[in-house]
Image (cartoon, rainbow, N blue to C red):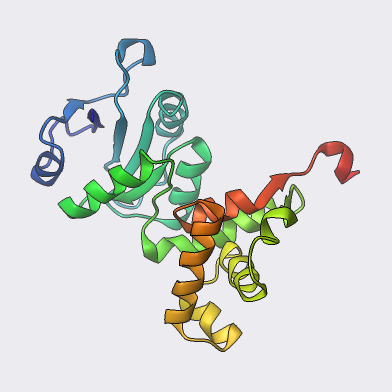
Amino acid sequence: MNHLFITPAARLQPRWQAAFPQATLAAVAPETDRLTPPPDIIWIVCEGEQQPLSAPLLEAVTRLSAESAVVVLANAPQQADALQALQAGARGYAHALSPVATLQQIATVVTNAGIWVPADLMAQVMGHTWQALNGEQRLRHALLDKLTEREREVALAVVQGASNKQVARTLNITERTVKAHLTSIFHKLEITDRMQLMLKLTEKVSAKERI
């Protein structure tokens, strides 16, 4: 698997090298026609501590995501930045100092059509994404019909941004039971994570239907 790290620092951190020994480096985002063959994953490093993602960085995410899975690494991950990165086409958003095992797990997820966001940001990102889709998306009831009544309750709570703990409290069940339901839901719908669940259960409403 080919990995390209794009970082203004023009150096690979030891943990990145340990995770992906054959990774290559670029100081700026190259033009896509110069990437032959395209890397499997492009890791774009945002060096600023509390700076919002810049327009050029987001443009690079959009351009490069057409050929490769893109992951944005931030020194200070922020909810708003995670949303922007995903909306621009990134498959993942994580801390630049993530452990080696986490980086390797991210690589596995994004190359298998999954989306990676840190656990502490996932619920917030899901909730805000659901709100942003409100009015433009509708639920795929045919897919919901594959689930049991309790699984549907869990699925609908999760896609609106509820954490396992919140779902358990709302439905008066244990977190262990919530996890068991999610495992069953993921298996039935042939998905691997919460973000895929939301994307799978919704479909775009046409402009004509919104009138």
Residue 120 position, x and y percent, is 39, 66
Q: Quadrant of residue 108?
A: top left
Q: In the picture provided, is 199 more to the left or to the right than 121?
A: right
What quarter of the picture does the N terminus occupy?
A: top left
- Residue found at x 40% / y 54%: 117
- Work out whether residue 98 can be spotted: no
Q: In the picture provided, is 206 more to the left or to the right than 77?
A: right
Q: Quadrant of residue 149?
A: bottom right
Q: Residue furthest bottom?
A: 172
- Residue found at x 50% / y 66%: 184
| Label total for image | 0
- Residue found at x 22% / y 47%: 104
Given residues 132 and 35, the one toward you in this image is 35
- Residue found at x 44% / y 53%: 192
Residue 180 position, x and y percent, is 46, 73
Q: Is residue 81 above or below residue 128?
A: above
Given residues 36 and 26, the one toward you in this image is 36
Q: Is residue 153 above or below residue 130?
A: below
Given residues 51 and 170, the one toward you in this image is 170
Q: Quadrant of residue 176?
A: bottom left
Residue 141 position, x and y percent, is 74, 57
What quarter of the picture does the C terminus occupy?
A: top right
Q: Is residue 176 above or below residue 76?
A: below
- Work out whether residue 54 can be spotted: yes
Q: Residue furthest right?
A: 211
Residue 133 position, x and y percent, is 68, 51
